[in-house]
Image (cartoon, rainbow, N blue to C red):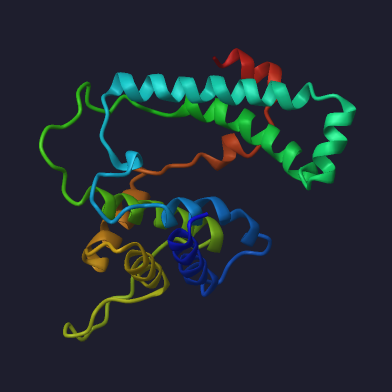
């Protein structure tokens, strides 16, 4: 990991550490922290925040499901020496968890609703796509790691700024990445979208149960 990214990683990790995290959640933060640490402050430059047509989104979701299915099958067909070699490298527990995650990815791709995506990407420059996109990611992660819905505290004194743990997280992450945006505005929009089921909607009940590989294969 480049030194600059490593410094951002540590700063974002610290921002999450001040939250009241659920037990056993620390190890699950690595991926999202790495994603955030590698982002650029320039709006729209990261592919995760570029718009795409409905057809392209559908195709890439199915491509993801296909690759996930292949990886899951590969992991399940490993011979004992390979499994033991992976275990020696510290890949024992992660191997079984990755198999389940791959199976979940297949079903998630089939559950994903792309019906409301425009047939063609929206023309023109979107309104601060990266700041709002990151805020939505943080809203989902906040709820996942704390077990509480993201909220903001609005003081009765209008001369004071809104606060709370969620805005604190946004402020720390934006400062680390180098994004200049209204923390309160993006927080309110992210909370609104989360409550309405837009943006990052995760169907925990369907996806957290173990899906047999044979059934996952039939989903494609």
Specify the farthest residue to the front: 3
Quadrant in the picture for residue 147: bottom right
Say which of 56 and 19 sits in front: 56
- Establish if 178 lies above or below 163: above
Query: Left or right of 35: which side holds 21?
Result: right
- Establish if 119 lies above or below 108: above
| Residue at figure coordinates x 34%, y 62% from the top left | 177
| Residue at figure coordinates x 80%, y 25% from the top left | 78
| Residue at figure coordinates x 49%, y 53% from the top left | 34
Query: Left or right of 159: which side holds 195?
Result: right
Quadrant in the picture for residue 190: bottom left
Specify the farthest residue to the left: 124
Give coordinates of residue 131: x percent, y percent: 27, 55
Say which of 193 and 141 sits in front: 141
Quadrant in the picture for residue 60: top left
Give coordinates of residue 85: x percent, y percent: 84, 37
Report the number of discs: 0
Give coordinates of residue 140: x percent, y percent: 44, 53
Query: Left or right of 56: which side holds 35?
Result: right
Say which of 147 and 118 sits in front: 118
- Establish if 167 lies above or below 142: below
Give coordinates of residue 62: x percent, y percent: 46, 20
Q: In which quarter of the image is the C terminus?
A: top right
């Amino acid at each position: 990991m480049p030194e600059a990214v490593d410094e951002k990683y540590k700063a974002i990790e610290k921002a999450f550490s001040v939250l009241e995290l659920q037990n056993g959640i620390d190890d699950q933060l690595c991926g999202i922290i790495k994603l955030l640490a590698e982002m650029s402050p320039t709006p729209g430059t990261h592919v995760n925040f570029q718009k795409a047509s409905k057809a392209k989104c559908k195709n890439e979701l199915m491509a993801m499901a296909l690759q996930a299915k292949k990886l899951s099958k590969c992991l399940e067909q490993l011979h004992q020496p390979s499994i033991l070699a992976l275990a020696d490298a510290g890949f024992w527990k992660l191997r079984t968890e990755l198999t389940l995650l791959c199976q979940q990815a297949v079903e998630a791709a089939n559950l994903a609703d792309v019906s409301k995506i425009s047939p063609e990407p929206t023309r023109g420059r979107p309104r601060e796509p990266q700041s709002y996109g990151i805020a939505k990611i943080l809203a989902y992660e906040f709820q996942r790691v704390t077990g509480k819905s993201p909220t903001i505290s609005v003081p009765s004194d209008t001369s004071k700024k809104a606060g709370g743990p969620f805005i604190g997280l946004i402020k720390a992450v934006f400062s680390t990445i180098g994004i200049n945006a209204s923390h309160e505005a993006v927080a309110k929009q992210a909370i609104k979208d989360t409550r309405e089921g837009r943006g990052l909607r995760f169907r925990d009940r369907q996806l957290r149960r173990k899906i047999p590989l044979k059934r996952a294969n039939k989903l494609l």
